[in-house]
Image: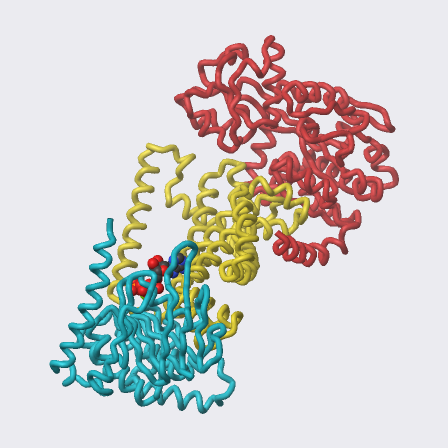
Amino acid sequence: MSYLEFRSVTKRYGPVEVVAPFDLEVAEGEFVVFLGPSGCGKTTLMRMVGGLEQPSSGRILLRGQPLGPPDRRRGMVFQSYSAFPWLTVAGNVAYGMRYRRDLTAAEKRARTAHFLRLVGLTDFAHQWPNRISGGMRQRVAIARTLAAGSEILLMDEPFGALDALRRERLQLELRRIQREEGRTVIFVTHDVEEAAFLADRVIVFTRRPARILAEVDVTARLGPESTLELRGSAEFFALRNELLALVRSTDEEEEATAP
Amino acid sequence: MRFWKVSAAGLAAGACLAGAALAQDTTIRVLAPTWVGFAPALVAQDLGCYEAEGYALDFRFEDDRANVMAAMERGDIDADMRTVGEHQGRPRVPETPGTIIGTIDISVGGDGVLVDGSISDVSDLAGRTVAIEPNIPARLLLQMALAEAGLSLDDVQLREIATADTIAVLADPSVAAVGTYEPFLSQAVTALPDRNPRILLSSRDKPDLIVDIITARDDELAANPGKFRALLRCVYRAVDFFGQDPARFAELAAPYYGLTPAEVTEIIDTSLAYTTYEEAVAYLGTGGGTGKLHDVFRQVMQLNLEYGAADTALDPGQEIDNTILTGLWDGVER
Amino acid sequence: MAGSRHRILIGTAASLGLILLWEAVSRSGAVSARFLPAPSVVVATLWTMIAERGLLYHAGVSTLRVWVAFLIAAAMAVPIGILMGSVRWIGAALEPVIDFIRYLPVPALVPLSIIWFGVGESTKIFLLWLGTFFQLVLLVADDVRRVPHEFHETAMTVGAPGWRRLTDVSLPAMLPTLVDNMRITLGWCWTYLIIAEIVAADSGLGFVIWQARRFFQTPEVMAGVITIGIIGLLTDQVIRAAHRRWFRYLVR
Ligand SMILES: Nc1ncnc2c1ncn2[C@@H]1O[C@H](COP(=O)(O)OP(=O)(O)OP(=O)(O)O)[C@@H](O)[C@H]1O
Ligand SMILES: [Mg+2]
């Protein structure tokens, strides 16, 4: 039995088929990146995992159990509006535990401090989200989902709006945290390099309706470590080009079918 | 809908019940337009009259006839004051609450029709634009004058206005005449020299036509006639007081209207005459008989029906009740 | 903060300029003083009205009425609006009714409200409320709908129960716009004052203005109007200042 399992999941909005029968298994602790052309249905798939959207048919199983409505096992990190502006950085992280009855106030405080340290925001604990950078806000959101105790982090283009340098730093951090905390991540991006760098496995989608065009096992190709040195390596480059070619092929497909 | 009805009703209950229910039997609740003609009812309060009679006065200003009728219908007031003509106005039918029990003043120059310099006679108004608020007394004056000249309101172009805008309206050269009342009547004459305005018709020339009456709510009149006897006694005592000391009367009346005593005196002198008890008796008659008001009532009724301001011919015998007035001073000092 | 001092300076200068222009126009005789008394005359009138006609008392009465009506309206509009904006069928059920009532001309409803509420305080409060509630409730409903869905989804994925999302997400997220909208509707509430206070009138600025109008006392009318303007300006500034204080987190 695998950890997270898509079984013939489809999604249609009225006449529009967004996800064709889709099957995928994700292992616990795995970092899976969804890569695909715009509008192919990546967000839709991810939202179905989060329970924010229901499959039209098929099932998504977590440890063999069908998924119900949203709960804190599946945490979301959005590209924008990722932190509540009316709460401080620490308040946002603590918000992840607000509805948890299994923790005492002292435990919540300790966990808040822990995850703030983990994402490197201890010094900004009392700052308002509007006064910190976009990358810091994404870190706040990551810390909040971790503090909530989410086993799966669902991240929809979380670093899309960041400059290259911040993005790189955040990628490193995310990878480290994910390893340390042993969480499963599903990560959506358009950036081929980001996909190659972060993923254990990259799923490349076709155009809508989403089908799997290719699966690339990055760990098998590059090893489990994501380091900056790796980024300069020839293997990384080859992988990146391969992914790029796959993405291009979906694009050409689009041009071919366009009237 | 339900939300606000409930909450607003709760509010109403809280605010009203507490004060009103307790004092209802001994409070005389009156609504009347902002007009100095009704000052005796207010001045009587300063003279301590209501108190001496064992009552308290709750007098508020309300210019809108529809609002007064609504309040009367609901039983929120005991009496109102208005001209006979307006009393008859739509939607009054014989069953509508409100019976005439006395008079308070008559218009003597207080209402009139202003014309520009080009108009020398009522017949000149034919085909011209006349601006007037639909149901004010000046309309009756105009209607009568037109009738005497063989014309009717259909022969002029009527424009509805708010009387407070009199001067601004008359400043428009396309307007030949404005029906209005004081203080606009006399102020327009001086305010617009280039239009050379003149008072063509004045209530001074028809002193009986515009009579301000006191109306009682029928239920309360039947249940509590003493209240209305007290009201009338106090009004006529204040009118007597005006006869003895008009200067002091003006001083007492002024604050209610936001005017100076001099302004009050001027309005009284140019516009109106208070009716004494004896004059009221002459209007209403006594002991179930009739008086000159019955004729005025019929005449005005006819004009209102013609114009369409009223749609039911009311019988003065039904609308006027002189029992309160009859023997008003029996056993009490005037 | 130099910027805000600049603003105050410009605002004051512009107002002063306008007043001087007004004074000049009135004195020149281009417009009859009967219609446009000079500001100096209005200010003198304002002073005598305070000293002799209890203008401050009337202002106090009006302020109290406006605030009572407004607070009732707000206390109803906020929860109802939040429900309308969050629960689809409630919004669908109430919106047409409220939209309809919102367009009814309040002055035409006066006799009806007298039938319901009599000629006492309740009618005045009701009329003020009528002019405020229906506007505010729709603004609140819109504010709730404008809360980014990401906020709600974030809450859902940390396990917030449905109703806690109203209090923990919708309310704080919309609060700054809510306060702004309340400030604006409070201003509208004042504009209904004349309508409310000429009904069975005995007190209040609306009554004073209407009575002065009845006797063609233009300076008194102006003084009354200006009193309302001053109260409005002060209230607005106080709420703006409070807004800045309460919602510091909005400043980047
Ligand atoms: N609520 C909806 N109703 C109708 N169509 C929808 C809805 N949500 C998404 N779609 C459609 O489904 C398709 C897939 O959308 P989705 O957001 O999953 O794409 P995506 O792969 O995340 O795209 P992008 O990379 O641009 O974010 C799109 O064509 C979109 O227009
Ligand atoms: Mg997307």
Please report the residue visible at 48 percent of the width from the left and 88 percent of the height from the top. A103
Asked whether residue C53 is in view, the answer is: no
Q: In the rendered image, which quarter contains the C terminus of chain C?
A: bottom left
Counting from the top left corner in percent of width and height, residue A40 is at 31, 63
Closer-to-camera residue (C236/C146): C146
Q: Position of residue C184 (x, y in %)?
A: 43, 55
Location of residue B235 in the rendering, given as x and y in whole percent from the top left corner: 73, 38
Q: Is residue C184 above or below residue B302?
A: below
Q: Nearer the viewer, residue A157 or B34?
A: A157
Residue C105 position (above or below residue B291):
below
Total number of numbered discs in the rendering: 0
Name the quarter showing ligand 2. bottom left
Q: Which residue: 33% across, 67% down?
A: A42
Q: Colour of chain C?
A: yellow
Horizontal relation, residue B20 to residue C39: left or right? right
Task: Give the drawing colour for chain B.
Answer: red
Q: Which residue lies at the image location 80% right of the left edge and 42% below the top edge?
A: B220
Whether residue C247 can be seen here? yes
Q: Position of residue B243 (x, y in %)?
A: 69, 33
Looking at the image, residue B328 sits to the left or right of residue C82; the answer is right
Residue A26 occupies which quadrant of the picture? bottom left
Quarter of the image with the N terminus of chain C in it: bottom left
Chain A representation colour: cyan
Q: What colour scheme does the image use?
A: by chain
Image quarter for residue C172?
bottom left
